[in-house]
Amino acid sequence: MTNPLRVIAEIDKNIKKKRWECMISQCTSNAINSHLIQQNGVLSNIAEKGHLVELKLKDIYTWKPNSSPFEFKKVGINNAMSHKVFCNHHDTSIFKSIENKTKNLNSYESFVLLSYRATCSEIFKKRVEIEKNLRLINSTKLGRKIDKCRLQKFVNGFELGIVDLEILKRELEKEIELKENRYSYYAYSYTKIPVYASAIFSATDLDYPEKDVDIDLLNIYVHILPLTNETLILIGYHNGFSSSDIKAYCKSWANLSREELEVKLSELFILYIENWGISPDFFQRISNQNKVKYLNLLQESIHSYGISKRVDFNFFKI
């Protein structure tokens, strides 16, 4: 008798081994694991014995229905926040200015390049989910043991998301090439908190899309960078796809107390983004109660979007 979990796990395993082409147009070279945030001078500042802790999806064998599909997992720094996005040539040439020792990470160029990486990473993750769901739908071993209609709705939603992201990707590529200052961003420096993140998220209030909807280009780019002596926060948007709410949200990160910043980061990591990590030592100091509450809040908000939502919870309170 076929074990559905074993089939799903095998599909996951095969997808991880799949070769993906570089995301640069007309490049057919194999993509390598591209880091959203550079190791040297950023992630290395908070790694312990070459490891960090990140939010990850649970293995299908360990996940139980009605529980959070996420867990905190220790990862090696070489695998921290990395995806098969660019080939070695393009990963090196495009991002050279933010990878060298004299990089200025609070510059406009750094914001644009980090946002480009984050956008391409989101496209890749959605492509992976589409590939996985299509393999599940087409599996002869699973047959009627899965809800194919529901999986197809997921595929439709991911495809809609990619349409939006491809437009945003091309806009960032134009900016990298032409340097027309079509983006606005804010750089905030705070006393160091050993966490990191790099992501793009929708500023539009909507539920998980199951059918055609208008293109959603109102997005915010955010990057949390733990430098040697500070935490640098870069946050901004495309000037042509903005709103008063987006501008107000970006400005709301200014002049925060330590506790206010921790609450703000907690809200960001619950409602808006999943691409984040934390130093192992700092993670160990956080109570188990807070960890459980965080995962529960994340589960409750997993299919909702928009910057009007709020969560009053400090995950980092010790």
Image: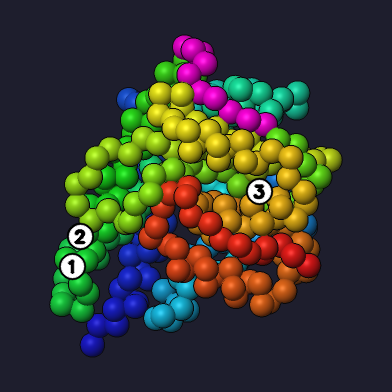
| Position of residue 131 in the picture relative to residue 188 (left or right) | left
At x 50%, y 65%, the residue is 298
- Could you tell me residue 201's position as x and y percent? 46, 44
Give the alpha-carbon distance from disc 1 to disc 2, as whole Å: 6 Å
Expressed as whole percent of the image width and height from the top left, the position of residue 60 reads 41, 74
Q: Does the segment drawn in magenta span residue 48?
A: no
Could one spot residue 78 in this view of the protein?
no
Residue 4 vertical placement versus 231 (above, below): below
Q: State the SS at label 1.
A: helix
Above-or-below relation of 111 to 288: above
The residue nearer to you, when weighing 141 against 81, is 81
Quick one: quadrant of the C terminus?
Answer: bottom right
**Location of mark 3 (residue):** 196
Mark 2, secondary structure of its residue? helix
Residue under the point 70% across and 50% down = 261
Residue 148 circle label: 1
Residue on which disc 2 sits: 152
Task: Answer whether residue 140 is visible to the viewer in this image.
Answer: yes
Horizontal side, residue 144 vs residue 300: left or right:
left
Q: Which residues are magenta?
A: 178-187
SS of the residue under disc 3: strand
Q: Earlier in the sequence, mark 2 or mark 3?
A: 2
